[in-house]
Image (spheres, rainbow, N blue to C red):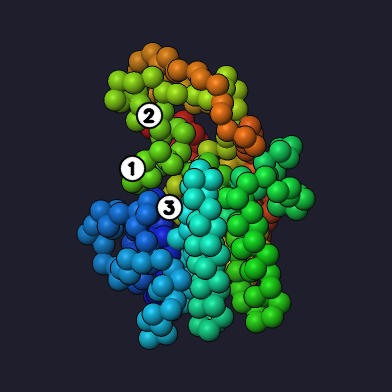
Amino acid sequence: MSKYIVTGGAGFIGSNLVRHLIRKGHEVVVVDSLHTGSKELLRGLDVELYAMPVHEFYSSGRWREMKIDGIYHLGKPSSSPMYRENREKIVEFVQGSVAAFEMARELNVKVVAASSSSVYNGLPPPHREDLIIHPTDFYTEVRLFEERLARVYEDLYGVRWNEMRFFSVYGPGEEYKGKYANTVTQFLWAVLRGERPIIYGDGTQRRDYIYVEDVVEALELAMQSRHNGVYNVGTGTAHSFNETIKMLEDELGRKIEPLYVPNPIKNYVMVTQASTEKAERDLGFKAKVSLREGIK
């Protein structure tokens, strides 16, 4: 079996990945600042936890004492509003990126890292990995920086890498993300609290929702792959917020009346929809869980 570093392993996607790896018999070292993660998501799991930012873990040198087979780099500020509220998150992101690739260089292992479909903002769907990206947001700029950084580490040092452009990921373990959780999850929480879900705009905006178990499979396939490069992690199907509310109505068996309010966000992403051909061809990845099944 193998031993992996999972940065952000106490977060939503990271904890699901950690559980999956442990079920398969692998050893896992978790590095997490616990900003939007929690030790509770790792309860009962046999992991080695370092509760610190990735760059601090790198500076500690502890990783040099470990026999590591790969790095999953998910530990980074994970929502656009975080950067608009505090631009120092840009520095945190860059420090973590450099740390992850420096560890991979020295350990001679592959990095599979989290990027985002938000980089496609303003571009017509379906979104292909070879589209020319325009600057729109701090959140997307740092992700593009890391994708380019990965190519430099490959060219100069032969580092193997994949940057995985996640579309709208939802599923169990989002509770510690709070207001940064996926919209489908926030809609569900609001209904269960007896509140009206808030929709910014008219609800026609569409998202390519992908269940977290599918994302975990994509990450594992990437780690096993001989291919370097950027890959979409989505289903290829986009659903509007209004459609999503209707699915929640069907599953909960109750009428839901959203509260529609003006959208205050500049550079808002209206549509995300993955082109899935590249991931299917190179990684053998195809999402299995539909939105309706995921909601169940």
Q: Crowdedness of circle 2 by 10 Å Cα count: few (<14), some, many (20+)?
A: some
Q: In this view, does 245 lie above or below 255?
A: below
Tell me which label, 2 or 1, sits earlier in the chain: 1
What mark, if any, has residue 35 been given in the picture? none
Q: Residue at x 61, y 73 (%)?
A: 160
Which image quadrant for residue 3? bottom left
Residue type indicated by callout 3: Ile
Could you say where residue 253 lies in the image, as x and y percent from the top left?
Answer: 35, 17
Which of the two discs, 1 and 3, labels the residue nearer the N terminus? 3
Q: Is mark 2 on a helix, strand or loop?
A: helix
Task: Give the SS element for disc 1.
Answer: helix
Q: Name the residue under label 1.
A: 175
Quadrant assignment for the C terminus:
top left
Residue carrying label 3: 13
| Mark 2 / mark 3, whichever is N-terminal | 3
Q: What residue appears at the point 37 percent right and 51 percent down from the top-left corner?
A: 36
Q: Quick check: 202 left or right of 58? A: right
Residue 137 % position (x, y): 63, 46
Q: How far apart are marks 2 and 1 (CA)?
A: 12 Å
